[in-house]
Amino acid sequence: MTGKGKNGIRRLWAELVLAFAIPLFFLLTSVPTGFVLEGPGPSFDLQAELTVEGTETHVPRGEFLLTSVSLRESNLVYQLLSSVRRDNLLIEVRRFLGEELDLQAQDRVDGILTVLSQETAAVLALRRAGLEVEVKELGALVLGVAEGSPAQGKLGPGQVIVSVDGVPVKGGAELGERIASSGEEVILGIGEVDWEALESSLQRGENPDPEELLAGGTREIALYPAWDPELGRKAVGVYTRDYFTHRSPVRITWRMESVRGPSAGLMMTLSLLNLLLPEDLTRGMKVAGTGEVFLDGRVGAIGGLPMKIRAAERQGAEVFLYPRDNQDDLAGVDTRMRLVPVGSLEEALAFLSSQEE
């Protein structure tokens, strides 16, 4: 065979390989798999990302580390790598987001939950430090809607229920009571969060006011409550979190552009409180942790606990505080850190105060 003929065959093979390689590369990297990939996210000292003005502050010796997870849509390459790497976990999208949400919608809800976590941390820490603070209740943020419920198709995650039958509602508990005692029909006033303003503020590292995010007005919808056997009362099938803002002479600024969601609440509260109190809560340690926190001081369950523990390990944390309700998520987790379950802010403070200098 002549050299010219051999070159022709090589070109033919190259064209065939290229013809198959391009679609294969697209298939491996672009085709959705129905899973999201969860891994350890950023972990850093929250006290370094916090500014307090209007009152005396104190310099801590130790650190309060925020922990987080990273989430991205999985492709076939990630699917294969996750089978041999312990730092990533595949989660079925439907199980993670439910039937109605997508990643963009979840990111929006996590954005407003970040703001509410900042508000909660501020209120709890200022109260504990004996400083002036006022809570202004604005309504109930919708986190989810039950399938087949009266609210399905009429309400969605991220909307705020601000009134019932024309009367302002303070939060989720009052909303449930008012609906349970309503007549056949209930009229809900709905406020819409300004998502563009929220996103712009978070990207700039600013802390938007929840009240200003609802400045666009409200609309009304009519629903017909149905009996909920689990609750033992009438309901419309929404899962909510209190939506509120706070007012105080003390100005608090959080800079957390890379973190979304409610799970930083406990560590934000401890970080702020540590700056406000003369006593060093860290006792000079690197303390990591996670947990949603509520205005009554409860610490609620969160997702991604094993990956957050790995993120804290990478930063050399000695202690990890986690929600007591997440105990079952520790199965198979191996770490050199001391893991401490807490059910409330008071429990976390009691543990920290018991540690020797």
Image (spheres, rainbow, N blue to C red):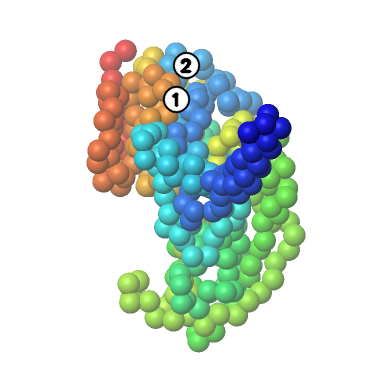
Q: How many marks?
A: 2
Q: Which mark is on residue 303?
A: none
Which one is in front, 226 or 90?
90
- In the current view of this chain or complex, which residue is farthest to the bottom? 184
Q: Taking the image as drawn, is residue 296 in sight?
A: no
Which one is in front, 286 or 75?
75
Q: Is residue 233 left or right of residue 271?
A: left
Residue at 68%, 47% (x, y): give it.
Answer: 198
- Mark 2 secondary-structure assignment: loop
Locate residue 165: give its quadrant.
Answer: bottom right
Mark 1: amino acid: Phe
Quadrant of the snapshot with the N terminus: top right
Locate residue 29: give its quadrant.
Answer: top right
Residue at 40%, 27% (x, y): give it.
Answer: 312
Quadrant of the snapshot with the C terminus: top left
- Mark 1 secondary-structure assignment: strand
**CB under 8 Å between discs 2 and 1:** yes
- In the current view of this chain or complex, which residue is farthest to the right? 216
Across and down, in percent, residue 19 comes to 64, 46
Across and down, in percent, residue 348 comes to 34, 33
Mark 2: amino acid: Pro
Q: Taking the image as drawn, is residue 78 in sight?
A: yes
Residue at 37%, 24% (x, y): give it.
Answer: 313
Q: Which mark is on residue 60?
A: 2
Which one is in front, 99 or 273?
99
Between the residue at mark 2 and the residue at mark 1, the CA separation in whole angstroms equals 10 Å
Say which residue label 1 marks: 64
